[in-house]
Image (cartoon, rainbow, N blue to C red):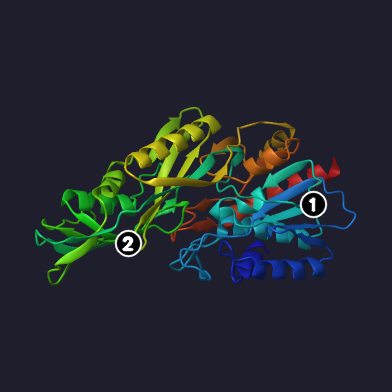
């Protein structure tokens, strides 16, 4: 039933900022199953039984990362795994939504919170106005079976803008080249940041630097929370550029231009020198402590905008990372803005996490607590509702936010059994 429900909602447009199709589905679904359905201005959805006890809140976000806006994933099943053809799968967090739909169908007395726009800055959670009554919350956005998540990284989005496009005379008769790299693996800029996945923007910047090129145009990256898998640039140079990756293509643009519009060399220097990736490792948790990802670069009419995503398991270190990045960008002549900040969820064991561990051990004796180097909405809810006890679980999902995303079918069903027993245990207390 879980896979059928997942496949059903996969047919509904769920890219971030696309709300109404899923809202319409939920209004109909809850009406058929005699549940109350409330929606707030941020397009969050809360479902519950009328006059129910509402001891446990189950929570998942309904939006997904789409590498192409509006694209509906074509699901394929191979060797026990679900994936999608040339797109993200949406198992992050569609499987969590499917779990909740299955429990609604079975009449489980819980609060069911479906949040909006998690993938673009936890917007729904940050702007939640729906009233929660539960004392416990089980987030279903974790992506590793056998790991009970009790902590996560905080994050900040940083936007650096350079306003210095200039028309110059081609006195040195420099040649124009088009540099393209695509079809890299990509990945999540948090949980995959330590996996040595190539960053398309950094590779293009290195190539331009090594041939003493000048940037005329550069666009790359897909989403603020993804490791960029493609980038394209047009440059002027007196030295023929050399491809530094097998996926890179370099094409000479025929003809000699007497003038061209170039951007200041400081942009290239920033891109080339920027320390992208893990900045510090947490040896106790065996995960990155602090990291930053060069996510997107866009050429506008007279400016270039660079988007970066910073993360840390510690709020003070996150602030330090933000301030240092702002100072560095400004030293290269950029104006800087920040947005999308969310706090770290400090790892915390409690009565609820102990219940989850006790139940989970019946199914997996090696289960353990963990924290993840990614933003979970749990951090927002813990900040909004200090008294609520929160834990997170989920099935094995690999390479979310990329076209390699896949989901272990057997894991989905094993975790669902754990979920049902947790729900029964809390409701009986």
**Rendered-image quadrant of the N terminus:** bottom right
From what the image shows, is residue 83 above or below residue 310? Answer: below
Of circles 2 and 1, the one toward us is 2
Front residue of 333/84: it is 333
From what the image shows, is residue 145 above or below residue 214? Answer: above
Front residue of 60/105: it is 60
Disc 2: which residue? 182
Q: Is 300 left or right of 52, judged from the image as shown?
A: left
Q: Is residue 366 visible?
A: no
Residue 358 is drawn in which quadrant?
top right
Q: Is residue 385 visible?
A: yes
- Sequence-first disc among 2 and 1: 1
Front residue of 87/217: it is 217
Q: Position of residue 368 (x, y in %)?
A: 59, 35
Q: Position of residue 404 (x, y in %)?
A: 44, 59
**Rendered-image quadrant of the C terminus:** top right
Residue at screen point 74% across, 51% down: 129
From what the image shows, is residue 353 above or below residue 294? Answer: above
What secondary structure is marked by label 1? loop
Residue at screen point 40% across, 46% down: 335
Q: Which circle marks residue 110 in the picture?
A: 1
Q: Is 255 left or right of 311, judged from the image as shown?
A: left
Q: Position of residue 265 (x, y in %)?
A: 24, 49
What secondary structure is marked by label 2? loop
């Amino acid at each position: 039933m879980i896979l059928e429900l997942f496949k059903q909602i996969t047919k509904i447009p769920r890219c971030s900022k696309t709300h109404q199709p899923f809202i319409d589905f939920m209004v109909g679904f809850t009406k058929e199953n005699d549940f109350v359905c409330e929606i707030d201005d941020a397009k969050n959805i809360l479902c519950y039984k009328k006059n129910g006890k509402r001891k446990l809140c189950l929570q998942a976000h309904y939006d997904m990362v789409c590498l192409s806006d509006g694209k509906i994933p074509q699901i394929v099943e191979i060797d026990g795994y679900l994936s999608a053809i040339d797109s993200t799968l949406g198992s992050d967090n569609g499987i969590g939504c499917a779990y909740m739909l299955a429990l609604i169908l079975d009449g489980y007395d819980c609060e069911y919170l479906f949040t909006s726009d998690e993938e673009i800055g936890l917007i729904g959670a940050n702007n939640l106005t729906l009233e929660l009554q539960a004392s416990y919350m089980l987030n279903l956005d974790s992506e590793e079976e056998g790991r009970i998540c009790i902590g996560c990284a905080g994050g900040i989005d940083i936007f650096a803008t350079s306003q210095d496009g200039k028309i110059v005379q081609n006195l040195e008769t420099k040649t124009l080249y088009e540099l393209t790299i695509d079809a890299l693996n990509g990945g999540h800029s948090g949980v995959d940041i330590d996996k040595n996945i190539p960053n398309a923007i950094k590779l293009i910047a290195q190539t331009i630097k090594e041939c003493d090129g000048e940037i005329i145009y550069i666009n790359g990256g897909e989403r603020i929370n993804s490791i960029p898998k493609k980038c394209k640039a047009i440059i002027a140079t007196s030295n023929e550029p050399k491809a530094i990756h097998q996926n890179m293509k370099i094409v000479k643009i025929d003809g000699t231009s007497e003038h061209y519009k170039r951007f200041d060399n400081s942009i290239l220097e920033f891109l080339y020198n920027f320390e992208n990736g893990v900045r510090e490792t947490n040896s106790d948790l065996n995960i990155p402590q602090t990291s930053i990802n060069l996510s997107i670069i866009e050429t506008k009419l007279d400016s270039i905008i660079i988007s970066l995503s910073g993360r840390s398991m510690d709020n003070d270190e996150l602030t330090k990372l933000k301030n240092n990045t702002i100072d560095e960008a400004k030293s290269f002549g950029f104006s800087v803005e920040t947005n999308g900040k969310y706090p770290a969820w400090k790892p915390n064991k409690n009565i609820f996490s102990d219940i989850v561990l006790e139940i989970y051990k019946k199914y997996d004796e090696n289960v353990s607590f963990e924290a993840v180097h990614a933003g979970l909405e749990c951090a927002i809810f813990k900040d909004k509702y200090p008294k609520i006890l929160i834990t997170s679980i989920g099935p094995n999902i690999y390479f979310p936010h990329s076209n390699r995303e896949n989901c272990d079918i057997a894991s989905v069903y094993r975790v669902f059994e754990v979920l049902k027993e947790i729900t029964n245990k809390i409701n009986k207390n």
